[in-house]
Amino acid sequence: MTDTLRTGLFAGLVVALIVGTGVLDNWNLALIIVNYGLISAIMALGVNLQWGLAGLFNVGVMGFVALGGLAAVLISMPPVPEAWAAGGGQVLGALAIGAAVIAGLIAVYKRTAGRVRVIAMVVLGIVGFFLFRSVFDAGVQAIEAVNPASTGFLGGLNFGGDSGRDWPIMAVIAWPVGGMLAAGAAWIIGKTALGLRSDYLAIATLGIAEIIIAILKNENWMSRGVMNVIGLPRPVPYETDLQADPDFVATVTDLGLDPTLASTLWVKLLYSGLFAAFLIVLLILAQRALHSPWGRMMRAIRDNEVAARAMGKNVTARHLQVFIIGSAICGLAGAMMTTLDGQLTPAAYQPLRFTFLVWVMVIVGGSGNNFGSVLGGMLIWWLWVAVGEYGPDLMIWATAWMSDDSAFKANLVNSAPQMRFLVMGTVLLLILRFSPRGILPEK
Amino acid sequence: MDFLNGLVFLTNFVIIPAAAYGAQLALGALGITLVYAILRFSNFAHGDTMALGTGITIKLTAVLVAFGITLGPLPTALLALPVGIAATGVILLVTDWLVYKFYREQKAKPVILVIVSLGVMFVMNGLTRVFFGVRDIQFADGERFLITVRQFRDMTGLDEGLAIRTTQAITLVTAVIVMTALFWFLNKTRTGKSMRAFSDNEDLALLSGIDPDRVVRVTWLLVGALATTAGVLYGLDKSFKAFTYFQLLLPMFAAAIVGGIGNPKGAIVGGFLIAFAEVTVTYPLKKVLTYWLPDSMAPEGLVQLLSGDYKFAVSFIILIIVLLFRPTGLFKGQSI
Amino acid sequence: MSDNAYQDDRGNKDRSITKPGGSTTQTVRKGGKAVPTNSKAFLIGEAMTGGYGKGPDILHSCTIAVDPGEIAVIVGPNGAGKSTAMKAMFGMLDVRSGHVMLDGEDITALTPQDRVIKGMGFVPQTHNIFTSMTVEENLEMGAFIRRDDFRDTMTKVYDLFPILKEKRNQPAGELSGGQRQQVAVGRALMTQPKVLMLDEPTAGVSPIVMDELFDRIIEVARTGIPILMVEQNARQALEIADKAYVLVQGANAHTGTGKELLADDEVRRSFLGG
């Protein structure tokens, strides 16, 4: 079977599953799967760049996704002027102090040595920490006191009116900014973990992801923490506006559709178009990169690092580069997802869902194959939703032989949505065992 | 007197909880380090193995309690623990036979086994969720306290009280017993030594006639025992919730690596180090300092260095510092 | 990229999650049985042809034999297949034709582990000790297959290598190169082997230590154990050899006693530098 045919068949399967969901169940669900599937595909593309192309083991995808989500808030939400007046300057000042202290620590580390270095760093660190906290805490308190039920945070940079609806483009601008935020974090992690004597990337990413989530949950002045930021502006029209628009209602009625249903579908379709556009651009870039001299060099480094080093390639720098790019793509996808959700819920970020599920997508699709990752992302996302949606029905059918008042049966039916973890694990283990290169192997 | 009061307060709110948590982390990290030493990969499924073993023990405890069998002042779970350990051991052996064995025969690279363990993690997580649910389960029964705050105050006449929960005492006693037994096993028995030899130099171990399958089997049984014990102790001390066990992965990995991954002594030291750092940094120390410092210097704020949500950051920062200055961990790694 | 997808780690070198150094040696498949034969030599690899895995043949009808009371050495230029010949006799590569026979049994189909049980002692060239374990534990691991009391054997090993007795509670990894080799030989002797095979025991040690090691090896031979040895230092090896094999490109080039070969002009010219 040729590669093209294999790719075509795989794509056909994914399309058939989604269309099947639409025809047999409902099109709203199918489009939801498409939208989140496209975002998952972008995440998988990012992880594939890191693992497939460079062999970097990143288990902190969740952190980069969450940073993207934060960017969606910081860029697309309208600012809260009262909060800015109350403590905005103070918090920014405190952050500047913090940055200055870190810069100072680095300078001390570079300029001094021996005992002087240790003492200077400890003293500077402690003094800096308490200085930072004293300025910072007061500012934060002031910000969080401003109308805590609805705001209590600084808001974002969207100056398009109180709801931010006048500047919908800010939502799209937030996406690449999310990528940049993730890239910044990746630079710090990569500098530390890839620069150590051996790579300690896995444990570093695992840790940093948890820390990022902790920050989002805890720093209310920035992200409202567990109170969530809701009502994020979106780049597409609102359903209620469409239903109130006579032109739209007339057009869809002519087509024989119910306006309410049509408005929900239309909004989702617009999202699909936007996400697909981003995905296609990224996919083209990834393919070009793969077949460029840069991509060949990355694979050469991966396959024989010693030889690549001997030929004068700066392996650590290349690893850092590809790690940053891959993380940025995950951040971009994370920002898209938060915009699509319409809210930032830090407590919803779970490693199984946002890190390891993406890994399943990459491995099942085919590590090192961009099309494989994209299609793997769509397929696994469909499966994830399908098991959650149809699992209970299936379980009722499978336990039909049990008596209706059996507690065990009730327990099984109730926990059927949890079956998705079981299914994902089984799929991953089966693929690893019987098709270790994934559905679309790397050429 | 102020000094003693401060000390008692610190012991009550920081030292005892941290010691119990440290013992739980250390037991968990020991399991990770054993798999790493013998099977040469980091087992991402370890947290979920703990959850599964604990879940089984909880169900058994419920059965025992339903039959009216309890341990009096001690939690009934201790009675169910050996059966829970056996069941977890069997699950791990079956997992090895179904999953890991194939990759060993293929001489698969360790990182492939890491990815395989991700699959096992999903499956075990799913099993835990399906069979034991996702809600919080409290299963500690028996006496709640070994010594209460009031008893301690009456005894000593100090202002501050010291309470030792039964679960904390049990955790520490069990941990000491388990760790002693493990070290005795690894250093004194023929099987234990053969495991160390296998970890040190696999090819030479094979030449010496050490049966690799037996070494692997014994390892999984030990890992099952360590994971279930750690999980049950943690669950007794706090509560059982499927995904908190998954979140223990990070501090446990950090403990194992800080100590020098593959080294059991390191895992224990690392576990306590991480636990003490986490609790100290995230606990408001105002009262201790008020006791200890002269009145003029008494702190105004809570002196909580970081909010509790940042406990992961603490283990992580310790990890990074150790890796920067001692990349092999505090103890030389690569040997059990 | 590796042919075997399970061995493709994509160049990953993350030490926080993986421990390198797992077993990679290809060995004879499990399940073979020893068959009685009427071979005359005590240990003989007869007309061995074979190579590693699916690779090309390295040995071409190569014959190596050793009898009780003898020291046999294999010498030859770099890449001649000296170590390969020894590994073939120990079952660490596919012998595609030819036989290996020990003490009247054909053991060609046995795994290395089973050959150890049959009485072969093998000291690999590198990684031949458990570095993190004490000297005494190394010896104990050498005796792993024995279920009887091995304290006598350990005393004998300590008599042969007195320095090991002195350092018996030290981790073997902390010893010097020559001492490590003594641990390695001692470990192999713990099974009370019928034959001892040494793969370049003097590789990487200083000339003084090398002389001492050769003395020890002669002493071991005096206890009656036949020794088969691969050596890089051809001249010294030939001096102590009762029987010597010169291999060239995986085939026997010259065979004789050590003295004969030392006297042989052609051997001198080609391998001993005149």
Image (cartoon, coloured by chain):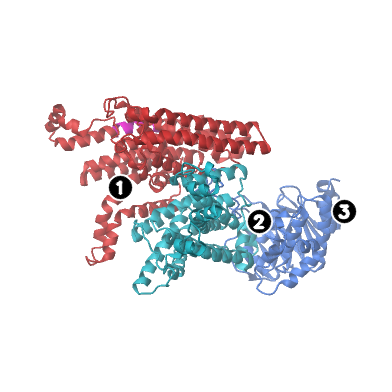
Chain colours: A red, B cyan, C blue
Q: Which mark sits nearer the N-terminus, 2 or 3?
A: 2
Residue B15 appears in the picture as rendered: yes
Name the residue that disc number 2 marks: C49
Classify mark 3: helix, strand or loop: helix
Classify mark 2: helix, strand or loop: strand
Left or right, A437 with reference to A403: right
Q: Which amino acid is tagged 3?
A: Ala
Q: Residue at x 64, y 36 (%)?
A: A117
Residue lying farthest to the right in this orientation: C263
Name the residue that disc number 3 marks: C263
Q: Which amino acid is tagged 2?
A: Thr
Residue B41 appears in the picture as rendered: no
Asked if badge 2 and badge 3 are on a common chain, one would say: yes
Residue A271, above or below B41: above
Name the residue that disc number 1 marks: A385
Question: What range of the chain is rendered magenta?
Answer: A272-283
Q: Quadrant of residue B232?
A: bottom left
Which quarter of the rendering shows the N terminus of chain B? bottom right
Magenta span contains residue B158: no
Q: Residues within 10 Å of mark 1 (few under 14, many from 20)?
A: some
Q: Residue at x 63, y 32 (%)?
A: A110
Disc 2 from disc 1: Cα separation: 59 Å
Please state which of residues B317 and B207 is positioned toward the viewer in this rendering. B317
Q: Quadrant of residue B107?
A: bottom right
Mark number displayed over residue A264? none
Of discs 2 and 1, which sits in the foreground? 1
